[in-house]
Amino acid sequence: MNAVSEPILSIQNLNKTFADGFQALKNINLEIQKGEIIALLGPNGAGKTTLISTICGIVQATSGKVTVAGYDITRDYRKTRSIIGLVPQELTTESFETVWNTLVFSRGLFGKKANSAHIEKVLKALSLWDKKDNMLMTLSGGMKRRVLIAKALSHEPAVLFLDEPTAGVDVSLRKDMWKIVQELKGDGVTIILTTHYIEEAEEIADRVGVINAGEIILVEDKTELMSKLGKKQVSLDLCDPLATIPQSLAGYSLELSENKDQLTYTFDSSGDRTGITSLLDDLKAADIYFRDLNTTQSSLEDIFVNLVEESS
Amino acid sequence: MNFYAVMAIYKFEMARTRRTLVQSIVAPVISTSLYFIVFGAAIGSRITEVGGVSYGAFIVPGLIMLNLLMHSISNASFGIYFPKFIGTVYEVLSAPVSTVEVVLGYVGAAATKSIILGLIILATATLFIPLRIEHPLIMLLFIFLTSITFSLLGFILGIWADNFEKLSVVPSLIITPLVFLGGSFYSTDMLPPFWQSVTLFNPVLYLVSGLRWSFYEISEVNVLVSLVCITGFMLLCFSVVLYMFRTGYKLRT
Ligand SMILES: Nc1ncnc2c1ncn2[C@@H]1O[C@H](COP(=O)(O)OP(=O)(O)OP(=O)(O)O)[C@@H](O)[C@H]1O
Ligand SMILES: [Mg+2]
């Protein structure tokens, strides 16, 4: 990590125990650099929303310290909250307010001078411009989700929290949102998002954090994570079906498919020796020929499932 | 001071009133007219004068108080309860606003509505009976202080309430009886001595008495006592609100 630049968000030993005694956050430590996109993954009830709500001032921390751009979230709450934009997980909107007015409200609430040009820009970016005079209750769920994003962007935050921004959003809109997130990143906005769609994290995040049962069990650069934990597999389509795997290949823990015409070899792509060359040599020596070969890499999803299973 | 935030909340709340104009303004005007017809005409034909003023005129300050109290409480409580109920309160809780700013926005809007309403009731009253106001500025001061104080109380109620029943129980089960038993529609001299003493524990008595003094210079208790009471109660309510926000009471988990 770059030692010169101070992190835009720093979380130290953060704990949250709710009034009913349930500990939702357990000694969370996390630093996020300016301009990063970090995806938080974790099963339902892991504590993602609680973490975000604590940073935004909705939930009170039990102990620990959080700073945003160097400011403490309780002592300098005015500074930190004016920097932060929040898109909540729940679709909560007024009913009788118009789209335009709700954005004007949000901007004012966050202490920014009225700026119609900016609000127009945000509405257009989110394809809501033609709905600007609609009452919120007349919008579809996906449109309401976009209104919530527009509200958060209306006050030009430097740090944006997106709590499951694409839940219940159709594929094309999800792609639009990914584009918007990339554009915001281009503008220097730091983005922390939670998601249950692993491909979303894979697609847009720079780093991935995994939370389970209130603990951060891993934070890693996305590509490093995938190469480190990623298993690769080579599948070989055999010319002639094989009755059994010959003794000479026993060391490779190969798998033979049900109809006996495909061999699968799993290896660690980050290891020094993958064993592929010797496998191919040994196959030739055993007179096994194949007509096709393809490799597959495990996705973040597989990694994630493995991690959560291991930790619980 | 986050002035933009205060204005945003204030305007939002005022816009809500415009959408419910009938409920906020027309309904109270109609009910006030009914009071005049029933109390003023029917009862007033038997009780001709109280403390030297006609019965119809005597009840005007009480009617104004009744409306100020009920509407300050219901407006302010609903203003904060509803966002809590539907979840939009997250935005206010995550905004760079202090308690004072939130209160200025919500309570300021609720009090503004009550003040306007009080003046409309007053105007309605003049349609039924000739009125004189000896101390208009003191009258305005009472309307002002009462609206703010009971909007603060409504705000507290809205934060405290976690269902609609609690929200309506305070106005109907506490405020209405206090108003009716607080000398709004009669002079406490008309009561037996025991009940006169009991009435002195009713805070509404001090409000009605003070407001009535500003009209006709007749009062149950000294007008300064009334002013001190309402100011003290206002400060008490404000301290409670500050405490609620500082501890996150029912707002922040
Ligand atoms: N106010 C509360 N009081 C008590 N427990 C709570 C409260 N809010 C949340 N919790 C608990 O804290 C845990 C974490 O909840 P949280 O909403 O942070 O999960 P999440 O990771 O966002 O889950 P999801 O993916 O379903 O959104 C859950 O077990 C939840 O029941
Ligand atoms: Mg959540």
Image (cartoon, rainbow, N blue to C red):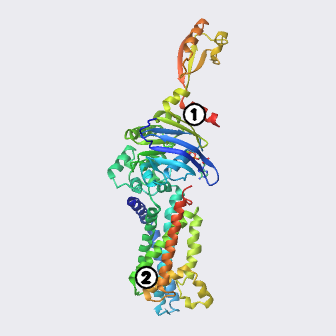
Residue at coordinates 43% horizontally, 86% vertically from top-left?
B215
The Cα atoms of the two marked residues, 2 and 1, are separated by: 72 Å
Which of the chains bears the disc numbered 2? Answer: B
Between label 2 and label 1, give the one nearer the viewer: 1
Residue on which disc 2 sits? B125
Using the rendered image, report if marks 2 and 1 lie on a common chain: no
B240 sits to left or right of A152: right
Residue type at tag 1:
Phe
Q: Residue at x 56, y 75 (%)?
A: B175
Is the CB of mark 2 within 8 Å of ligand 1?
Answer: no
Q: Which residue is mark 1?
A: A304
Toward the left, the furthest residue is A117
Quadrant in the picture for the N terminus of chain B: bottom left
Q: Position of residue A181 (x, y in %)?
A: 42, 40
Count neighbours of disc 2 (C-alpha within 10 A) and say few if under 14, some if 14 to 19, many if 20 or more.
many
Taking B147 as reference, is A167 above or below it?
above
Q: Is residue B99 visible?
A: yes
**Kind of residue sitting beneath label 2:** Ala
Q: Compared to B66, does A299 lie above or below?
A: above
Query: Disc 1: which chain?
Result: A
Say which of B166 and B137 sits in front: B137
